[in-house]
Image: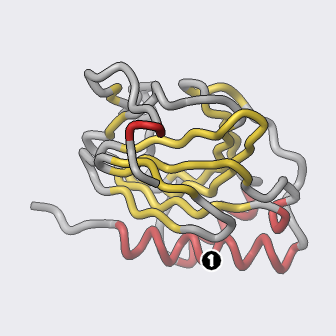
């Protein structure tokens, strides 16, 4: 079995966060829709500089910002080959701080706040959502990249249709 990349993804995320804080935020991001999530890459100089520190390339590690502005309780999913480190972000990135946000890990929803960190191993059910009027942005550092160079997505929707927050004790 191949060793987990999660410890290194954590160090990469810390380096990205530090770089962005020192720069006073990042340039405006261009968000696209990905299964209901907003996602945006970071500037090439930030990604390239950080990955070079670790001897890695964008083909090995994907770094992006994701946003949740609507109910995504129906988007619980797994990744068969991708591990991810997620950090909840806000004003340091020039974005609103989280409010009314939740993360789903394995079998339950948990409320999230600025700075919360989640390590998501291969094949662990996960997702993110917000209450009405809520907002959540997070830095996602993934290895292998969620979308391969040939365009294949490592996004496996779970067979259940919906995990409602009300079904769990928060």
| Residue at 70% across, 62% down | 89
Q: Position of residue 42 (x, y in %)?
A: 72, 52
Q: Nearer the viewer, residue 96 or 94?
A: 96
On-image quarter of the N terminus = bottom left
Q: Position of residue 160 (x, y in %)?
A: 29, 23
Residue 15's place in the image compared with 60, above or below, is: below
Q: Nearer the viewer, residue 147 or 10?
A: 10
Q: Would you say 19 lies left or right of 76 here?
A: right
Q: Nearer the viewer, residue 148 or 28?
A: 28
**In this figure, which residue is indicated by the disc labeled 1?**
15
| Residue at 57% across, 39% down | 129
Residue 47's place in the image compared with 35, above or below, is: below
Q: How many marks?
A: 1
Q: Nearer the viewer, residue 152 or 168?
A: 168
Q: Position of residue 113 (x, y in %)?
A: 65, 63
| Residue at 78% across, 70% down | 20
Q: Residues within 10 Å of mark 1 (few under 14, many from 20)?
A: some
Q: Position of residue 165 (x, y in %)?
A: 47, 39
Residue 143's place in the image compared with 31, above or below, is: below
Residue 162's place in the image compared with 57, above or below, is: above
Q: Quadrant of residue 14?
A: bottom right
| Residue at 62% across, 57% down | 139
Q: Quadrant of residue 44?
A: bottom right
Q: Would you say 10 lies left or right of 163 here?
A: right
The colour mode here is secondary structure
Give the structural element (helix, strand or loop) at label 1: helix
């Amino acid at each position: 079995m191949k060793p987990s990349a999660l410890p290194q993804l954590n160090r990469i995320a810390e380096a990205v966060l530090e770089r962005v804080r020192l720069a006073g935020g990042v340039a405006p991001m261009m968000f696209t829709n990905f299964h209901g999530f907003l996602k945006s890459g970071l500037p090439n100089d930030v990604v390239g500089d950080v990955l070079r520190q670790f001897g890695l390339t964008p083909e090995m590690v994907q770094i992006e910002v994701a946003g949740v502005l609507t109910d995504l309780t129906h988007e619980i999913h797994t990744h068969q080959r991708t591990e991810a480190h997620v950090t909840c972000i806000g004003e340091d990135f020039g974005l609103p701080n989280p409010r009314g946000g939740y993360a789903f890990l394995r079998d339950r929803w948990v409320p999230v706040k600025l700075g919360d960190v989640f390590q998501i191993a291969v094949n662990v059910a996960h997702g993110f959502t917000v209450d009405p009027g809520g907002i959540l942005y997070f830095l996602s550092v993934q290895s292998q990249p969620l979308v391969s160079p040939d365009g294949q997505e490592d996004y496996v929707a779970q067979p259940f249709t919906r995990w409602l927050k009300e079904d769990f004790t928060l």
